[in-house]
Image: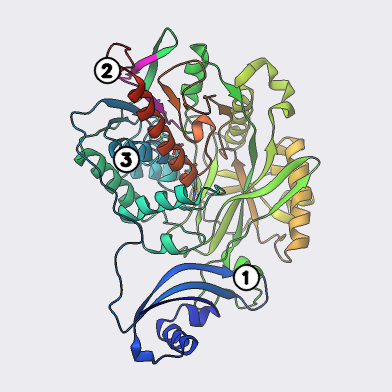
Amino acid sequence: MIRDLQLRLTPECAYNSTKLKTIIAKELNILFNDITGYRIIKRSIDARQRQVMVNLSVKVFINQPVDTTPMYDKILYPDVTNSPQVIVVGAGPAGLFASLRLIELGLKPIVLERGKDVDSRRVDMANIARKGIVDSESNYCFGEGGAGAYSDGKLYTRSKKRGSVDKILAVFHAHGASDDILIDAHPHIGTDKLPDVIKAIRRQIIKSGGEVHFECKVTDLLVSDDKINGVKTTSGTIYNGPVILATGHSARDIYYKLNSLGVTLEPKGIAIGVRLEHPQHLIDCIQYHSPNGRGKYLPAAEYSMLTRVDGRAVYSFCMCPGGFIIPAASGTNQQVVNGMSPSNRGTKWSNSGMVVEVLPEDLSEYDQYGVLKVMKFQETIEKRYYEESNGSQNAPAQRMLDFVNGKESKDLPQTSYAPGIHPARIDKLLPDFISHRLRKGFAEFGKKSRGFLTNEATLIGAETRTSSPIRIPRDSMTLQHIEISGLFPCGEGAGYAGGIVSAAIDGERCADAVANYLSKCNTDSNCGIL
Ligand SMILES: Cc1cc2nc3c(=O)[nH]c(=O)nc-3n(C[C@H](O)[C@H](O)[C@H](O)COP(=O)(O)OP(=O)(O)OC[C@H]3O[C@@H](n4cnc5c(N)ncnc54)[C@H](O)[C@@H]3O)c2cc1C
């Protein structure tokens, strides 16, 4: 017999299998030994009350073998070696999931990625941390796996399309991510595990007859008569076919190129601020309401902060419990920080972006740059931080209370940020319309969450790559650019996603749209079918 059970347990009972089995037997009024096994279907932590509880949804197998079939049907990837080809620019989550979906639909993806494969990228990232050298083709933003490859690998999204989210999680799982991502309310993979999952996705694409080309930067889009025929790369090679453009929010050269070609673009709001680093133990104490921290069973605590100050949102972004702050510049003359964490979220630090919403109308002094104005503002902030640091990746930093009180910090706490930090007036490096909102936001967060506003925490600048500063507008039905047929702007860089899962969902949607587009083309309509 199989029974479904909802349980609300202390962490000690929820994470200890013998204790959990004893509770299940008691709840179902059966013998301990009659339980052949159980499967946890969903798990979430409720830390709202003093006693932290874990909610479990469990399937119990009584006197019958445990059903170990995967929770999702296996996806079949046919051989597409001789199928019509589709050009996918960018091997981030949007490009990779678009490619897998194209294969499912019987189409051949040709993936063109400017950066290196996910292993070779490591050397270039180490060079940023150790020598301050940023390779503008291979860094934390560019390379196989995209911006999400060396991240926390948080897989939660505000998307309400449960079916689409579950499919993305199932694909990650099928390519090696742990069972936990199918169970946890806030799933994450971790920076140590993500590269293997990405390599498994690449192997699947190639095994099915698709192609993946690294160090293959797209430098031109071949557009004529409002239709795209293909793309040209740095080596001069031309690839023909419909194009899924999934180049991410940091590919500024692509925005410049599109703008120079006269392709319609729109400025888009972003959020800008700092990375805030606390000792993880402090966050555990606050979030789990215990002076002893998280104890033996609970994971490193998370938080999420949001308020509005003078008409703009102030919020925490991409929180990484037990993680590191990393240098995320993707070009010269930039200083940018971001965060990541390993699968065990085991470092002694917690970090999050603390950012203020910036809308195009806030930047009238950048009007001269037209649709590129928000991106120009982003560039200006990154350059200001870089110059303040004498052209290094050693970042300006200020203790949190000192920031709120407008004081330079005399000294700074230890940090996870490998290139190091130095005291600076972050409140002055940021424009006042951001600084003053952050200051008020911090004061409010400190009231809501006692202990959060503290000089044990450090602000490290600058957090600027929160989303795309530009939207590449597309038709809501066909997902093609509003003026160029065969061009499918996709993922975060096109302004249609924010985060790994939503970028992956958008990749799948674009693949469906390309299949639809190609199915409508007959042999002499020249849709770019090869
Ligand atoms: C350090 C860090 C940590 C993050 N942590 C998380 C997290 O935990 N959870 C989460 O949901 N999100 C996280 N994000 C955000 C997330 O990574 C992005 O939202 C997501 O990767 C966007 O996917 P994408 O495919 O649209 O674009 P990207 O991932 O940016 O991929 C774009 C790809 O296109 C390539 N490219 C660009 N230009 C060209 C060109 N001209 N020719 C060929 N290739 C090109 C780039 O090299 C890149 O590989 C993090 C981001 C960073 C930087």
Task: Give me the residue at 78% from left, 55% from top.
Answer: 443
Q: Is residue 61 above or below residue 355?
A: below
The three-letter code of the residue at mark 3 reads Leu
Rendering coords of residue 353 (x, y %): 60, 48
Rendering coords of residue 277 (x, y %): 60, 56
Left or right: 146 with respect to 393?
left
* Mark 1–mark 2 distance (CA, rounded to whole Å): 55 Å
First in residue order: circle 1 vs circle 3: 1
Q: Quadrant location of the N terminus?
A: bottom left
Tags 1 and 3 touching, CB below 8 Å: no
* Mark 3–mark 2 distance (CA, rounded to whole Å): 24 Å
For ligand 1, tell me if the residue under mark 1 lies within 8 Å: no
Residue ID for mark 1: 47
Left or right: 401 with respect to 45?
right
Magenta stretch holds residue 386: no
Whether residue 268 is visible here, answered yes or no, is yes
Instruction: Tell me where the magenta segment starts and ends, as one range.
Output: 228-247
Residue ID for mark 3: 100
Looking at the image, which is closer to me, 413 or 17?
A: 17
* Mark 1–mark 3 distance (CA, rounded to whole Å): 38 Å
Residue ID for mark 2: 237
The three-letter code of the residue at mark 1 reads Ala
Tag shown at residue 173 = none
Task: Give me the residue at 70% from left, 59% from top.
Answer: 455
Magenta stretch holds residue 237: yes
Left or right: 35 with respect to 452?
left
Rendering coords of residue 107 (x, y %): 28, 31
Quarter occupied by residue 487: top left
Dot 2 falls on a residue whose secondary structure is loop
First in residue order: circle 3 vs circle 2: 3
